[in-house]
Image (cartoon, rainbow, N blue to C red):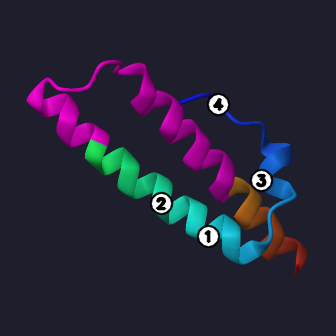
Amino acid sequence: MKAVQAEIYRDMPLDELRRTIVETEETLTRNRFQLSLGQLQSSATIKTMRKNIARMKTVLRQRELSGN
């Protein structure tokens, strides 16, 4: 999974951003499970997903604070 710039998340509608966060967290959980079973090809995927989730949550928090 490739790292995504925060600008893409800033342009997303609020409901789509929340849905993307949930989906990415679920995928992260599945990938962690696959890693523990030795089935995951690249462990760097987990790091990238965690950073993307952090970016999305940061944008979400910025919107909450700005009142949008």
Name the residue type under label 1: Arg
As rendered, which of 53 and 30 lies closer to the eye?
30
* Residue 20: quarter of image: bottom right
Dot 2: what SS?
Answer: helix
Residue extent of the magenta highlight: 31-57
Q: Estimate the x, y position of residue 25 in percent, counting from the top left.
A: 43, 55
Q: Is residue 14 magenta?
A: no
Q: What crowding class fits label 3: few (fewer than 14 Cα within 10 Å), some (14-19), or many (20 or more)? A: many
Name the residue tied to disc 1: 18
Sequence-wise, the earlier of marks 2 and 4 is 4
Q: What crowding class fits label 1: few (fewer than 14 Cα within 10 Å), some (14-19), or many (20 or more)? A: some
At 19% from the left and 41% from the top, the residue drawn is: 33
Q: Estimate the x, y position of residue 57 in percent, counting from the top left.
A: 64, 58
Sequence-wise, the earlier of marks 1 and 3 is 3
Dot 1: what SS?
Answer: helix
Q: CA distance from mark 4 to mark 1?
A: 18 Å
